[in-house]
Image: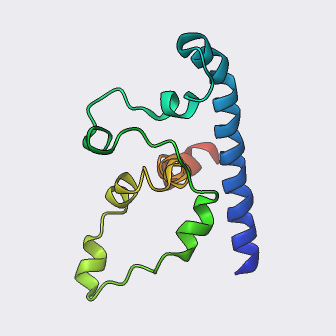
Amino acid sequence: MEDAKAKVRRFYNQYRQQEEATVQELAPQVQQTTGSIENVTTQITTPTSLDIDMWLFGPTVQRRKDELDDYLSQAVLDFPSKEEREAFDVMEYWRGHLRVWPTLSRMFFDLASIPSMSVEPERVFSG
């Protein structure tokens, strides 16, 4: 179990490094348009379409120090029945938690977008 946690931590850290690099790349552009660098995160995370949370609460500029630790400290989802567990929509879950755990959500959507293998490509390439 600890080996799996260590691998997830390394994977998560790679995503965080990519996000930090993106913020650093966009910082000069935002500084040119706004005149200051303090609004960089606000400028980057502000969606272009109507977002009810944005309208109600404004842009989110404070991020948790470590989303992964926060996520792992949450209670495990418990379903009272097999039917409810099978009806659970994991895509909707991560859409709903996009603002809470943006990096983890992005990791999920990137991984979920990988097509599953089928027997057909293996049959074609094995001759």
In this view, the residue in front, 6 or 24, is: 24
User: Residue 103: in sight, yes or no?
Assistant: yes
User: Residue 127: in sight, yes or no?
Assistant: no
Task: Report x, y in % for residue 82.
Answer: 28, 85
Vertical order, 108 against 21 (above or below): below
**Which residue is at a point 23% across and 81% down the rendered structure image?**
83
Where the C terminus falls, by quadrant? top right
Left or right of 54: which side holds 13? right
**Which residue is at a point 51% across and 42% down the rendered structure image?**
61
Task: Report x, y in % for residue 103.
Answer: 56, 50
In this view, the residue in front, 17 or 45, is: 45
Q: Image quarter for residue 18?
A: top right
Vertical order, 33 against 76 (above or below): above
**Which residue is at a point 63% across and 59% down the rendered structure image?**
66
Task: Report x, y in % for residue 70.
Answer: 56, 67
Where the N terminus falls, by quadrant? bottom right
